Image: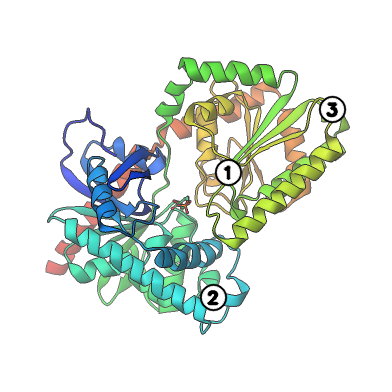
Amino acid sequence: CERQDEKPFRQRLLVVANRLPVSAVRRGEDSWSLEISAGGLVSALLGVKEFEARWIGWAGVNVPDEVGQKALTKALAEKRCIPVFLDEEIVHQYYNGYCNNILWPLFHYLGLPQEDRLATTRSFQSQFAAYKKANQMFADVVNKHYEEGDVVWCHDYHLMFLPKCLKEYNSEMKVGWFLHTPFPSSEIHRTLPSRSELLHSVLAADLVGFHTYDYARHFVSACTRILGLEGTPEGVEDQGKLTRVAAFPIGIDSDRFIRALETPPVQGHMRDLTERFKGRKIMLGVDRLDMIKGIPQKILAFEKFLEENPTWRDKVVLLQIAVPTRTDVPEYQKLTSQVHEIVGRINGRFGTLSAVPIHHLDRSLDFQALCALYAITDVALVTSLRDGMNLVSYEFVACQDAKKGVLILSEFAGAAQSLGAGAILVNPWNITEVATSIAQALNMPPDEREKRHKHNFAHVTSHTAQEWAETFVSELNDTVVEAKIRTRQ
Ligand code: G6P
C-alpha cells in the first residue's frame, strides 16, 4: 500500500481494518500474487504526507499452513501490509455471522435476525464469542508491531471490541475508532444482546468518529441511556475519563477520477458506450448487491416510471451494476435471486426485440470503465435504504463536470447531508416518489442541472479523503495531549 515516490512519512499510523486493501491469490506452496484494491480508505491514506501508514487486517483467504502464512506475510510486507490469519470457522462465526448477519443489518435499521432475537440462543452466543476472539487476534498482531509514538486507527463495526483489547495491552497507546456505517438510534442499539459490552469497548478509544453528526449523537445517546454515562459536548465521560466523540465526514480522491477522464482508455470507453446507447438517456446504479442498497425498490420505482410515462419507454435505459458481496450469507443469496426475478419480469414486460429497459450486471467494473460510465450518465440513482455515507454519489459527481447530470439520492444516506442541496432527495421506500423524481430528473432544464451540479462538485472536490484522514489523525493526537494535561491538573 506504499506509494514508492513519496518521502518517508513522519508519524507511524497503524490502520487496522477487517480487510486488507489487497486481494491475495495463492500461486504455489510459497508464492502469492497480490493486487492492491484502491478503495477510498487506501487513496485517502496514500495522499496523507504527514504519516507513514501500515495496514493490519485479514487477507480474505484461508491459509492453514505455516509455509503459506510465512510466504504471504513476506509478500504483504513489501506493500506495508500485515496479515491477521483467521481460520474458516472463525470467519464463518465472526465475519459471516456476527458482523454481517447481526451488526450490519442492525446498524442499518433492518433489525436482528429472527432466530437471534433471544440472547440465549446458541448461535448468537457463539458468534459473539468468535467476534471477541477475532478482535483479540487483531489486537495481538497490533501489539506485536506497535512502537511508542504510533497512532492506531481502528476501522468499522468488525472491530468494536478492539479498542478495549488494545488499551489492556498498553494504556498509553493512542487509539482511534471510526465507524463507516450509520450508528443507529439508541432504541435500535438497545435491542442488541451484547449492547453494553460493545459500547464499553469502543469507549476505551481516545477518539471515536462517525460520518455524520446524527450518528455521533445516536452513539452518545446510547452511552447515556444504556450505560447511564454522562454525555458532554465533547463526547462521553466515564469515571473522569473522557472519550472524545465527533463527526468526520469522509470524501474521495476526486482528482484521481477527474484525471482519469482525460486518459485515452476512459475516452475510448465513453465513445463506445455513447454509441451503444445512442438515442437513449442513461440512468445508472452502482451498488454492492446488499439489502441496504435498496436495489429491488429502485428497480420497482423504475418500473413505475415506465408504466406512468409510456413516451419514455424506448428513450431511457437503466444500467444497474450490482457487485456481488458476502455471498456465503444466506440473506445475500436470497437478494440475488429476488433482484434477478424482478429485472427479468420488467425486461419481459417492457423490452422489445431490439432493446431492454434494464441492463443488470452481477459484477464489478474496472476503474476506467466505471469512470466512463459515470461520465456519460444522465441520471444516477443512489437509493440506499440506509448507508453510512455512500461514495458512489461522490464519484458520480466528480465525473460529471462536462455533462452535469442529475443525482437522485436517498435521504437515508450520509451523503444526503453534504450533497442534499444539489441532488434530488428521495425516500427510497416511497416508490411513487422515486418514480416522480426520475421524471423530474430526465426533464430538468440545463440551467437547473448546472446549478445543482456546481454545488455538489464544489463540495466533492474540496472535502477529500486525504483531508478526512488528516483531520481525524491530528484530532486524535490533540485529544491524547489534552487528556494528559487534564489528568495532570
Ligand atoms: C462496507 C463496510 C466496509 C467493508 C465493505 C465491503 O463499506 O463499511 O468495512 O469492507 O462494506 O464489504 P466486505 O464484507 O466485502 O469487506
Mark sitting earlier along the chain (2/1):
2
The residue to which callout 3 is attached is: 353
Q: Which mark is residue 226?
A: none
The residue to which callout 1 is attached is: 287
Q: Residue at x 21, y 42 (%)?
A: 52
Rendered position, 11 above or below 429: above
Q: Quadrant of the N terminus?
A: top left
The residue to which callout 2 is attached is: 191
Q: Of helix, strand and loop, which one carries label 1?
A: strand
Q: Of helix, strand and loop, which one carries label 2?
A: loop
**How far across and how far down the image is residue 344, in percent?**
77, 43
| In this rendering, position of residue 135 left or right of residue 344 | left
| Number of numbered discs | 3
**How far across and how far down the image is residue 324, in percent?**
56, 47
| Quarter of the image where one finds residue 449 | top right
Foreground pick, 432 / 134: 134
Mark 2 crowdedness (10 Å alpha carbons): few <14, some 14-19, many ≥20: some
Q: Quadrant of the C terminus?
A: bottom left
Residue 230 visible in the snapshot: no
- Mark 3 or 2: the one toward you: 3
Q: Residue at x 51, y 77 (%)?
A: 123
Q: Amino acid at mark 2?
A: Thr
Rendered position, 92 above or below 377: below
- Mark 2 or 1: the one toward you: 1
